[in-house]
Amino acid sequence: MVMPVIQLELAGVDAQERDKFDGGHEMGSNQQLVSPGDLITTDVGFMRGHGTYTKEDGLYASLAGVVQRVNKLISVTPLKTKYQGEIGDVVVGRITEVQQKRWKVNTNSRLDSVLLLSSVNLPGGELRRRSAEDELSMRKYLQEGDLISAEVQNVYHDGSLSLHTRSLKYGKLSQGTLIKVSPSLIKRRKTHFHKLPCGVSVILGNNGFVWVSPTEHEEEGGGSGGFSQNLSQVPTTDRTGIARVRNCILALAQNGVMLWDTTLANAYDACLKYPLTDLLKSDVMREIAFVTRQNLEHQ
Amino acid sequence: MATVLVSETEKLYVLHGVQEDLRVDGRARMDVRPIVVETDLVTHTSGSAHLRLANSDILVGVKAELEATTPARPTEGRLEFFVDCSANATPDFEGRGGENLATEISQALARAYQSAHVFDRRQLGVLAGQQCWVLYVDILILECGGNLFDAVSMAVKAALSSTRIPKISVTAVDGGEPELELSDDPFDGAKLDLRSAPILVTLLRIGNFCVVDPTPEEEACASAGVVMGVNVQGHVTMTKKVGSGSFHQRGLIEALKNGTAIGVELNRQLLNKLEEEDLQGYQRPKFGFLS
């Protein structure tokens, strides 16, 4: 038997290492980190946004996070949070329940989201009213545990979301792996579907769920909408790429680096000099995040 | 076992990965995720340890108490394991949800530590036939990142190795009632001999192969598994089958062989690190949950 990789460390070995890295990195001058109860400003000209409250003498933070100013509006974006949906967001979710005319979807928000039968594409792309037969075969299309990518169609007054998959880029997800990070780490971009050069596709859900899968080659433009699922074995090279990207995303998330296509590509380049099994070690993860952050500042 | 929802295609991906010896996180079948351990961080216990295996977070406290001996074993003390699955770990543990898992783990530990060859309970004897030390090992599962048996057992071993049994002297026997005197110095105590104490190693069968240190997703894909207690000499102190599936005879033998090798290596590294920590003395900085 080949000797297995086992790494057992004492606590604190890591903390000393971390101090070394943190010393070299300075927060941007316009960034302000606050914890609940911290005074943000005593000026009166500002508007109170999410994550803040006013007391007689000023504006205070009610969350731990980064202060953001948009003109006169001050809000605090929490570092770790449940997902608060907005219309048009791309999300990745897991079906938890099949109900009448709707699926319940776990999207990392406070309440489960709904996906109505009328907001999905039927197999074959037929456009018609949904019949009772469609309702009976709902579980054939999506069953409990299945993963989907979708877009937020509507936000209800209680904060729960209604999703839709009426585009061929959305729908059921096939082989790959899901990573859960904090939603505040996903940077909002024009597109959240990325094909990395290493043969790996990534969906960065706004809700903090990230889907990493092998790139499908034979598609023309849009995607299959999840109607056809490729069940053949994923080749080893793709699998290695996916494992690397997965560990890179975890490394970035653990060290508080925002996720979008540039950071992913940077992190992937940075991780190539390490063997795959080393990417789970916390010092290597920190190094990858550090290099990514540095590259970002130089660009 | 706390189960997570996993779709059929994700399972297929995990299964093929195990077949190819390249798991979802890039590990080979017999690789273990990084482990971080710290002992002696809870001040009001006789010994304690905090262990993190990827996302599994375990806190163990050991409390030594003087109690009456049992008639069957007058010269020996006792070890009592108690597992508490915090609802912080997963909502499934809420109420009595974690109880089955808790008893399963504590029974496995009790069986693994049963033999006198791995843990000599005479170390805990005080006064034959009258008084002995009872070690209450309280295990708190704070976060579930898979592979709880292994993580818990390593934390237990670390906590026991940091345990100091206070020095005690019998001053006078007064009408058959012995008078015991405890030393005032909290550092005046003896450490236990844990060189041959076991840890648990879980091997899960996914498809036709076994993996160690499964993630929660892999646990959801596994049909059967075997938990074994292994000490540093490579002695198997207990085995237990988990899951509803079956093992082929050849597969089982292979699994036990691999598990023993992993167990020996884990034990060796754990003992080395604990010794290293012990050498730093009691004034070393404590990190706790902030490391």
Image: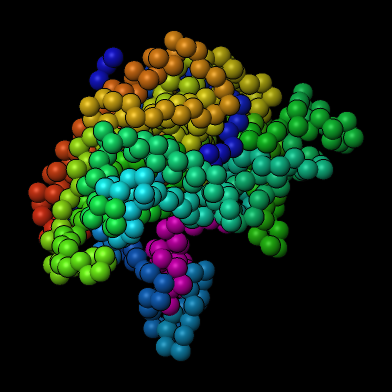
- Magenta residue span: A60-84
User: In the displayed structure, does residue A175 sit left or right of residue B69?
Assistant: right
Quarter occupied by residue B212: top left
User: In the displayed structure, does residue A100 sit left or right of residue B264?
Assistant: right
User: In the displayed structure, does residue A92 sit left or right of residue B209?
Assistant: right
Q: Is residue A264 above or below residue A208?
A: above
Q: Residue at x 51, y 30 (%)?
A: B242
Q: Residue B28's spot in the image, x, y percent?
A: 35, 22
Q: Is residue B235 above or below residue A106?
A: above
Q: Residue A140's spot in the image, x, y percent?
A: 75, 28
Q: Residue B170's spot in the image, x, y percent?
A: 17, 63
Nearer to the camera, A72 or B265: B265
Nearer to the camera, A15 or B280: B280
Count of number-bearing discs: 0
Nearer to the camera, B289 or B224: B224
Q: Quadrant of the N terminus of chain A?
A: top left
Q: Is residue B17 above or below residue A82?
A: above
Q: Residue B223's spot in the image, x, y percent?
A: 55, 24
Q: Is residue A284 above or below residue B190?
A: above
User: In the displayed structure, does residue B142 sit left or right of residue A152?
Assistant: left
Q: Residue at x 20, y 37 (%)?
A: B195
Q: Quadrant of the C terminus of chain A?
A: top left
Q: Residue at x 73, y 29 (%)?
A: A141
